[in-house]
Image (spheres, rainbow, N blue to C red):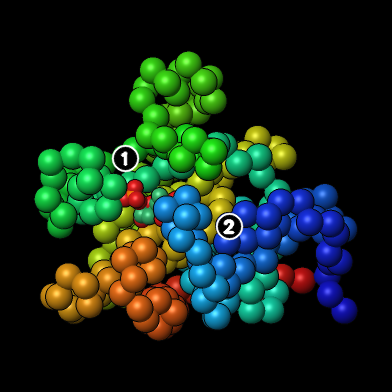
């Protein structure tokens, strides 16, 4: 018998659905096959993406948890369901860039592929209606989203996640170019890593491939119409499972 029963749908995002359960301290996240880019201007159904992102995220969360990084993750159930602690998601997307790519190179005179040392940390306001704009220090203060102390804690946690992910992906033969994370506050007020960590939210290059298109193993394959999206995610999954603990079954 299952350790929980599903309750009502609480929220549907672009790539996941969040459901209540019969336990106040557990919510169920269903990973969908929907792929979107450019604030959902580009959309597709990619069979198998939900399962792959659920498994990759679970593997990564297992390893991060084993290293003492606080996360919302509790375990998995079936192939595309993840059980997590309910959190109040802070409406800030934290992006850390180790190598210049993507929007940074469109907005700044920095060549794609330039190493960024120290890694660049940017905060964006999480609101699709406004296109997730880049936050300045002054705008962050104006919106009053977080206190200066919370902001420091968010940046410290994001940099810790970057160090852990760099180590993990290097062991897996992958280059972590950049990634986006979301953080939340649990019912007891603990700041934890939330959402997902997958090729939808990270730029990952195959460390053994030199060609600048062939090496792409993340959502840029979809954004740039390169094809082989699910195959690339499968490759990431295969490599990541070699360096992470097997995800625990919830319940
Ligand atoms: P960017 O270069 O487009 O700003 O993206 C930086 C990183 O953030 C990249 O790894 C992709 C990820 N990302 C998301 O996870 N969600 C988003 O909505 C966007 C725009 C980027
Ligand atoms: N996640 C965003 C969207 O769905 C953008 C992106 O990842 O490129 O539109």
Q: Nearer the viewer, residue 243 or 147?
A: 147
Q: Nearer the viewer, mark 2 or mark 1?
A: 2
Residue 243, image quadrant? bottom left
Q: Tell me how far mark 2 sits from mark 1, CA to CA.
A: 24 Å
| Label 1 SS | strand
Residue at 31% from the left image edge and 54% from the top image edge:
178
Q: Is residue 225 left or right of residue 100?
A: right
* Residue at numbered disc 1: 121
Residue at 76% from the left image edge and 51% from the top image edge:
10
Q: Quadrant of ligand 2?
A: bottom left
Q: Is residue 118 left or right of residue 186?
A: left
Q: Is mark 2 within 8 Å of ligand 2?
A: yes
Q: Position of residue 166 (x, y in %)?
A: 30, 60
Residue at 56% from the left image edge and 54% from the top image edge:
195
Q: Position of residue 201 (x, y in %)?
A: 43, 58
* Residue at numbered disc 2: 14
| Label 2 SS | loop
Decide: is 20 above or below 154. Answer: below
Q: Which comes before the other along the chain, label 2 or label 1?
A: 2
**Screen quadrant of the N terminus:** bottom right
């Amino acid at each position: 018998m299952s350790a929980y029963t599903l309750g009502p749908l609480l929220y549907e995002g672009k790539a996941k659905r969040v459901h209540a359960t019969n336990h106040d301290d557990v919510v169920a996240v269903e990973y969908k096959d929907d792929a979107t880019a450019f604030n959902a201007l580009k959309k597709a159904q990619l069979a198998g993406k939900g399962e792959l992102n659920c498994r990759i995220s679970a593997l990564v969360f297992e390893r991060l948890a084993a290293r003492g990084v606080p996360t919302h993750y509790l375990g998995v159930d079936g192939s595309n369901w993840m059980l997590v602690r309910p959190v109040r998601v802070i409406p800030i997307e934290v992006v850390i860039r180790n190598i210049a790519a993507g929007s940074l190179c469109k907005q700044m005179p920095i060549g794609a592929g330039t190493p960024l040392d120290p890694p660049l940390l940017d905060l964006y306001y999480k609101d699709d209606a406004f296109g997730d704009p880049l936050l300045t220090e002054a705008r962050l203060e104006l919106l009053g989203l977080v206190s200066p102390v919370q902001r420091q804690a968010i940046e410290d946690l994001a940099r810790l996640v970057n160090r852990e992910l760099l180590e993990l992906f290097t062991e897996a033969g992958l280059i972590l170019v950049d990634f986006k994370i979301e953080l939340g506050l649990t019912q007891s007020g603990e700041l934890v890593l939330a959402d997902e960590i997958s090729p939808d939210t990270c730029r990952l290059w195959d460390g053994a491939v030199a060609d600048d298109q062939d090496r792409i193993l993340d959502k840029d394959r979809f954004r740039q119409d390169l094809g082989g999206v699910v195959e690339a995610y499968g490759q990431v999954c295969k490599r990541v499972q070699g360096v992470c603990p097997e995800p625990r079954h919830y319940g």
